[in-house]
Amino acid sequence: MDMDNRWRWLRAVVIFAVAVIVCWQRSAAMEVNVYEAHALAVMGHASLEDREILEEIASGRGTGIHYLQAEGDVAPAAGEEKVIGVSLSKDRGLLGVFAGGEQQQPLLLAWLNTLPLQEIRIVELEKDHNAILIRELLDERFGAYFLSSFYSLYNWQDGALQEIWRKVCVNEQQWNRRWLFKGEGWQGISEELEADFGSKDGRLVIRTICQQTHWSAPAAAAARTTIQSRTLTQTYRWEPEWQAMAMAEGTLSKAAYLKERQGNKYVNSLQLAAGELVAVLEDEGLQAWINPQEAAYWRVKTKSGQTGYILKDCLEIRSL
């Protein structure tokens, strides 16, 4: 075995080991975090081969490859761009943005590794400013127990695609109570989302209604009994100042740490001062709803552009 092959083999082993650990942590936490899921899916995938796959499809040479496509003005280049998405396996996909019309050789402006793709759309953030909406699928029914799909919204910023919104569409998750040392039987979470993409005062507004059910059953495939259920109605608005789809703004009532999610733990990342203003991006209260002993968080973005999690009792919320 030559050195290059040894290195590839070692990298594959390391990636697999990390995947197993993070997957176990997510299952133990009883919550699928869509940001972690995406990061794990694209880990170790940034090859020229992926780029070549997209370029072959865009130039018409990718015969027999099933792909998704949308067209719209999403980048500063003149004219409309072609957005192409392809699923490579059950675990990952690719998204590419190309310039060049029918008479020109397509030029790849940007590309992303994604989860497998179910949908691509162009949506208007504001006048003459569009974004790319995709729907991704996370299928972890082999070796884990969840199946999720979620929206991801990308804006062209600083010469690249930047994610500005992510939201679970459908989530089916279940775990054996013995895994958590809490007795016999199974429990799970079911989520279903309705999303309306509209406009107010010339800016994109996304209104969502999410039905969540926490259930139990004597076996994985047995009839379910509802433990509790709730309906969450939330609104997200494109805020150019924050370069994000935000629910609200918040002011820190006291000094607190901006945290990052690592498996089933929230780890201190950056200390923020009392009075600091942040954009509120998402309600991260699902885990606390399932288990009231757990802390509830907001996902936020700071003025410096960093995203992370803040304890809810540290933030005073005000409407946009």
Image: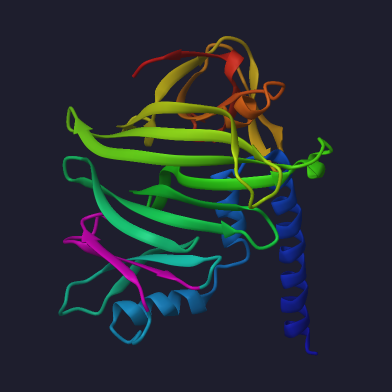
* Left or right: where 50 falls relative to 201: right
- Return the x and y of residue 18 as percentages of the image width and height: 74, 58
- Asked if 222 appears above or below 106 in the picture, the reply is above
Residue pictured at 29% horizontal, 81% vertical? 59
Front one among 109 and 169: 169
Choose between 214 and 237: the one closer to the eye: 214
Counting the numbered discs, the total is: 0
Q: Residue at x 71, y 34 (%)?
A: 267
Residue 109 visible within the image:
yes
Q: Is residue 208 magenta?
A: no
Left or right of residue 44: residue 55: left
* Residue 97 position within the rendered picture, expressed as x and y whole percent measured from the top left: 33, 64
**Considering depth in this image, is 214 or 124 the residue closer to the camera?**
214
Residue that protrudes farthest toward the bottom in the picture: 1
Q: How is the image coloured?
A: rainbow
Which x, y percent locates residue 212?
Answer: 50, 34
Which residue appears at 77% of the width and 62% of the height? 17
The answer to whether one can see residue 299 in this image is no
Residue range highlighted in magenta: 66-88
Instruction: Choose between 194 and 69: the one closer to the eye.
Output: 194
Residue 61: x %, y % from top left:
32, 87
Q: In the shown orientation, is residue 83 left or right of residue 110?
A: left
Instruction: Look at the picture and state if 72 lies above or below 131.
Output: below
Above or below, comparing residue 195 to residue 17 in the picture: above
For the C terminus, give its image quadrant: top left
Indicate the quadrant containing the N terminus: top left, top right, bottom left or bottom right: bottom right
